[in-house]
Image: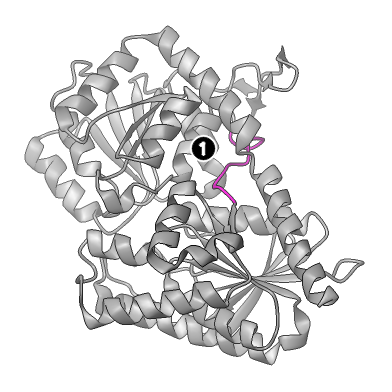
Amino acid sequence: MTADGKRVVFVSQTFPPEKGGNASRIHDMATNVQAGEWSVTVLSPPPCYPPGEFDRSWRRSRTDDVDGVSVVRLWTWQPTTENPGMKRRLPYYLLFGIHATLWLLWNFRQYDVVVTSTPPISTGAPGLVVAALGKPWLVDVRDLWIDASISLGYLQPGSALERVSRRFQRGVFHASDRIAITTETIGEKLLAQYGTELGEKLIVIPNGVDTDRFRPADSPSLDVASGDEVGELRMRDGDVLASNGRDRTGDDRPVIVYAGNLGSAQDLEACVRAMTHLDHEDAVLRLVGKGDLESELRRLTRELGVEDRVEFGGLIPREEVPQLLADATIGVAPLRSTETLSYAMPTKVYEYMACGLPTVVTGRGEIERFVVDSGGGVHADNDPERIAERFDELLGDEERRRQLGRQGREHVVERYDRGAIAARLSAELSGLLEGETAA
């Protein structure tokens, strides 16, 4: 516990070693807040996503120390099959929500503030109990989960489950003390669906990146505040790290990298098909991660006859991701082009740009605006030929790649460093705690 006794509990459905934007967001938030004036505990299930990548755990609970943060793994049902349907997902979500609620009740005197992270919306159940007991509660909204589930076919519009979910979500938002949103678009949609009176609770805590860990491999780092080149080359094992997409394995092909969940919200099928239209026939699309659509993407790769041009890298340790990105030529973040995903801003885009990696994105809304505002990449329509054109443009112009990489790096260092973002969250939590004390 810290000297002044500030204690916060994060409730999250995912946490490393699981991969994905939320796991890394909660890890970085928790560790950065812990490094300040807070004692931090994270409640999360045993790691199980993507399903089948982790052994099932039957222990009721287990507590680990992760970078100074106390991580309490609470048992829930763990799906083991690829792309589990809603019937298999619900026990995973609901049982963890119940277990987290019981933990918070039993340990009522061991925390001061609670942060629940959604999706899924079931993490709101522990928060409702905390609010009823008079503890401050912040809801961290990364995704409009109900809308996304309908768009991706997991939830039927107008169904009883949707109606119950909407009522529950409304209750969560109105009972909470603060609602943290990652983008302004999420806030606009949230107010339209659940009431404009929630506006006074909204705060923007965007996704971001640890810009010290995610950085260009062998180019001089840029001190954005002063504009001076530091000029220090990063070295490992005595060797200068590879650059410009030439990786350390000796493979000198240009690499187009995707690092993240191989899931339904990502238009990875269009990227695989784009490889059949690419003029740069030596380039390879490297898909690093696991997810519900991996089998389907592997099948498509075989059908198109591009096994030599599309690689599946599987899961890799989180600490290896910065090097993976720094060794690539182009990063790709392909969101599906749907209105319900127009609010989404994937964490991987910040990581690409922090590594000086020129980025190609698809989708509409926030992700398109971000890539334009940052100057760190280009947008393509969700069409294989248009995506291929963007890949070819960048693969054929090294100077433009360098310019985009430099601009993207500067943009995220200035505005989206996770340390600074966590400091904003810490200030909000302190305000909640002081408000409760004053009341």
The answer, for residue 327, to whether it is visible in the render is no
Specify the quadrant of the image occupied by residue 129. Answer: bottom right
Categorize mark 1 by other alpha carbons within 10 Å: few (<14), some (14-19), many (20+): many
Could you tell me what secondary structure mostly forms the magenta stretch?
loop
Magenta run includes residue 69:
no
Looking at the rendered structure, the number of numbered marks drawn on it comes to 1
Residue 295 drawn at (x, y percent): 20, 54
Residue at the left extreme? 303
The one of 146 and 436 positioned closer to us in this rendering: 436
Q: In this view, does 303 lie to the left or right of 1?
A: left
Does residue 101 lie above or below 80 as drawn? Answer: below
Q: What stretch is highlighted in magenta?
A: 205-214
Magenta run includes residue 208:
yes
Tell me what residue is drawn at x 75 percent, y 59 percent: 34
Specify the quadrant of the image occupied by residue 308. Answer: top left
The one of 250 and 359 positioned closer to us in this rendering: 359
Residue position marked by numbered label 1 in the rendering: 351
What's under tag 1, amino acid-wise?
Glu
Quadrant (top left/top right/bottom left/bottom right) for the C terminus: bottom right
